[in-house]
Amino acid sequence: MHMEIEKPAAIVLMALSFVIGFYVYPMLPASVASHWDAAGEVNGYMPAFWGVFLIPILSIALFLVFLAIPRIDPLSANINKKDYHGFILVVILFLFLVHIQTLLWNLGTEISFSLTMPLLLGGLFFYLGGFLGKAKRNWFIGIRTPWTMSSDAVWEKTHRLGGWLFKVVGVLAILSILLPANGILVVIALMIGAAIATVVYSYLVYRDLMGQASQKKRG
């Protein structure tokens, strides 16, 4: 029998975020760096408490929402538990790593976010590509447009393309660290482009299927 480790692992990461936060909180100044521009330079600050605990609190909130989704989704039978719990773990891990880097920066270890964010986002998008490629129609997770939600065939074709696009974007995002500057802007542009492409594609597939159905009726 498969032993589920994804949810316990996510809980451990969230607990560890708080433990580390409580440990380093007394070492930090009253105001800490909390936002960085595309070049990796600090351009935003917040009180130390929120700088330390905002991401852990956000992680718990997201975790609880993710756990609730299969319970309230009318199409919950289409959600593969193992894949879905893996998705939850990857999102919590992503937030944990961002949290740790933020704390390290404010403790004096200034690892550039312009280097790490393309890597983290690239890895996240590559994983999402695999996850989306296998996702079945549901109301909460996936590329949800009026056309994908109206047809299993449109959903499957759109997610097949979307999965491939997200993987490509993930690889390109990782490679963007080789750019001389502002690689994160390239990453953001690629992500927006992939999202728009999947929405447009879902409409085109739906239109074609409806056209074929109309022709059959007339024939």
Image: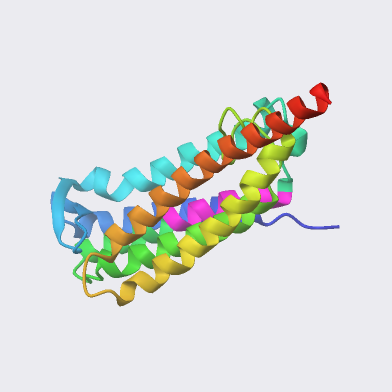
Residue closest to the eye, 64 or 207: 207
Q: Quarter of the image for the N terminus: give it.
A: bottom right
Q: Is residue 115 above or below residue 62?
A: below
Magenta segment boundaries in residue numbering: 82-95
State the residue lying farthest toward the front: 219
What residue appears at the point 61 percent right and 37 percent down from the top-left corner?
67
Horizontal side, residue 55 vs residue 46: left or right: right
Residue closest to the eye, 25 or 181: 181
Residue closest to the eye, 26 or 31: 31
Which quadrant would residue 108 be assigned to in this image? bottom left
Q: Is residue 83 magenta?
A: yes
Q: Is residue 57 above or below residue 119?
A: above
What residue appears at the point 84 percent right and 26 percent down from the top-left corner?
219
Type of colouring: rainbow
Looking at the picture, how far across and down is residue 142, in whole percent?
Answer: 59, 41
The number of callouts visible is 0
Residue closest to the eye, 96 or 189: 189
Q: Is residue 132 above or below residue 110?
A: above
Q: Is residue 8 visible?
A: no
Looking at the picture, how far across and down is residue 141, in whole percent?
Answer: 59, 39
Which quadrant would residue 116 be assigned to in this image? bottom left
Horizontal side, residue 123 vs residue 106: left or right: right
Q: Is residue 177 visible?
A: yes
Which quadrant would residue 96 be assigned to in this image? bottom left
Q: Is residue 51 above or below residue 176?
A: above
What residue appears at the point 34 percent right and 54 percent down from the top-left corner?
188
Looking at the picture, how far across and down is residue 154, in whole percent?
Answer: 67, 38
The kind of secondary structure the magenta stretch mainly shows is: helix
State the residue lying farthest toward the top: 218
Looking at the picture, how far across and down is residue 36, in whole percent?
Answer: 20, 56
